[in-house]
Amino acid sequence: MSDRTDRTDTGGIPAEASRESYGVGPAYPSSHTQFTSDAPGRYAAAPGADTGSPAEPAAAAADSTPAEEPYYAPSAEVTVGDGLRDVGMIFLGASLTAGYGDPKGLGWVGRVVARTQHPDLDLTAYNLGVRGNTSGDVVARWGAECHPRWKGRTERRLVLNVGTNDVISGMTMARSRLNLANVLDEATNAGIGVFVVGLTPTLDDGLNRKIEALAEAQADVCSRRGITYVDCYRPLATHDQWMADLAASPDRAHPGQAGYGLIAWLVLHNGWNDWLSLS
């Protein structure tokens, strides 16, 4: 599979080979700040395991101070078969996952799927992005909507991208990270491979501070579980084309063609092939 992304869709980001996945710092275009293992910043992998009590179940009523989720080791592993692999891949999230505002109708999901065609994959992809969804909505619907689509597939994959509406709706940080942890734990315990795409910046500096904090929390939740997390906030917060794309959009909140191409580039160049065990 080629890692090259069409410049029309990436806003001019250069095509470079895949680099090390999140944990020591994400791979960005060479024209942007590089984050290395020497200075990973606040998004560094979490320290050792917590020893706290188990996380409360996903169905529990929301409260303002939910228990901190513990370090979690899945009891099942993703099975990657030999030969042609029958993969069911589901993208779950809100409007950004749905690709709202892209005049091409592809969003970042369509662009990523287009670049994931491979001779070893018989890939069936589903976009289950729903505008306005919070992480709580995803917790409530993911099982009922995803499992029927995985029926008959020998390899199950889940890509999550949610959280901005948590901030907008006033959800607490603890509740938001616990919602993410519940989905990750349930999925990985069932042998489902999970990949998390992080939050993106807006034009509102005040909102961005909260989004950045939640992005950091999501990275921590993922690192505790050994799940790949793609940091989209930091590279896009200083990317002129991303900000210009938001400013030019009708709602000044969702990107257009170039912005979605930038997200796709970040996904494809931050552990995507490793996660899918593609050479």
Image: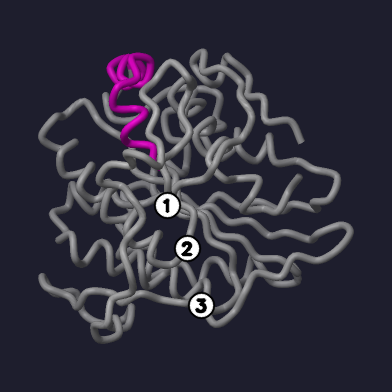
Q: Residues within 10 Å of mark 2 (few under 14, many from 20)?
A: some
Q: CA distance from mark 2 to mark 1?
A: 21 Å
Picture quarter with the C terminus:
top right
Q: CA distance from mark 3 to mark 2?
A: 10 Å
Q: Is residue 71 above or below residue 206?
A: below
- What label sits on residue 226 in the rendered view? 2
Between 131 and 66, the one lying in front of the other is: 66
Picture quarter with the N terminus:
top right
Q: Which residues fall within the magenta stretch?
A: 231-248
Q: Is residue 254 above or below residue 146?
A: above
Residue at 65% across, 65% down: 156
Residue contact between numbered discs 3 and 2, judged by CB atoms under 8 Å:
no
Residue contact between numbered discs 1 and 3, judged by CB atoms under 8 Å:
no
Predominant secondary structure in magenta? Answer: helix
Q: Could you tell me which secondary element the residue under label 1 belongs to?
A: strand
Q: Is residue 174 magenta?
A: no
Q: In the image, which is nearer the foreground, mark 2 or mark 1?
A: 2
Q: Residue 244: image x %, image y %?
A: 32, 14
Q: How is the image coloured?
A: one colour
Q: Residue 194: image x %, image y %?
A: 53, 61
Specify the amino acid type for callout 2: Gly
- What label sits on residue 93 in the rendered view? 1
Between 18 and 135, the one lying in front of the other is: 18
Q: In the image, which is nearer the foreground, mark 1 or mark 3?
A: 3
Specify the amino acid type for callout 1: Gly
Specify the amino acid type for callout 3: Pro
Q: Residues within 10 Å of mark 1 (few under 14, many from 20)?
A: many
Q: Residue 72: image x %, image y %?
A: 41, 76
Residue matched to label 3:
74
